[in-house]
Amino acid sequence: MLFTAEFFTSCPTFQHYARREKTRHSLSEGLVVFANMALKVGSLKVPKGDFMALSGMSERTLNYYGGIKGISYLLRKTASEGRSRLNAEQVENLRKIGIGAIALGHLDALLIMKEDPEVAMRRDGWPAGCFVMLESDGSGDDFLVFTSATGGSEHYQMSLADMTTADWVRLN
């Protein structure tokens, strides 16, 4: 399961669309079902009939939220609003269904690079072509290597801005 129903309740977009208790329950369950179906299909183009059957959402309710496109918009918006609560597996699964480039905090970026040494990360504020990768020396110590747009590489020490902003994006 990609998400639980409680993930969506603290997101401002979700709260805007679901003001009543019955609506909150219906929409959160619908978003959970939609996310799981999208993961199985591999895209946000989920069959309407299957979605309605699995979620229990009526056609009238689905149309109120803008149909399948509206539900996919709500999923994308709430996932980006709740990105600080996403774990690495959820981010990876969101990338599989087409919700990519969800920015992360520096700890999540480091965790992803530690799990997969081939991953390159960058900050949105950096010029195009700049990225960092995690490398290890012979003694098992890890360090970041910054590669600039010109192709030069150097050791990289994270600044305060790197640690306080959540604009890290996975490149590959």
Image (cartoon, rainbow, N blue to C red):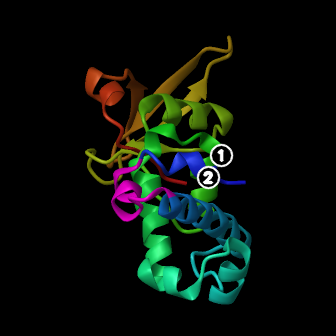
Q: Is the Cβ of the residue at disc 2 closer than 8 Å to that at disc 1?
A: yes
Quarter of the figure with the N terminus: bottom right
Magenta: main secondary structure equals helix
Tag count: 2
At horizontal 67% and vertical 75% (from top left) the residue drawn is 56
Q: In the figure, 139 relative to 105: above or below?
A: above
Q: Nearer the viewer, residue 153 or 27?
A: 27
Mark 2: amino acid = Glu
- Using the image, tell me which numbered label, if any, was put on residue 92: 2
Q: Residues within 10 Å of mark 1 (few under 14, many from 20)?
A: few
At horizontal 49% and vertical 72% (from top left) the residue drawn is 72
Give the distance between the C-alpha atoms of the residues marked 2 and 1, in whole angstroms: 5 Å
Left of 25 or right of it: where is 131? left
Left of 86 or right of it: where is 65? left
Give residue 15's position: percent from left, percent from top. 38, 55
- Using the image, tell me which numbered label, if any, was put on residue 89: 1
Q: Report the magenta residues as a range.
A: 11-21
Q: Is residue 102 magenta?
A: no
Q: Quadrant of residue 65?
A: bottom left
Q: In the figure, 126 relative to 113: above or below?
A: below
At horizontal 57% and vertical 75% (from top left) the residue drawn is 44
Give residue 53's position: percent from left, percent from top. 72, 81
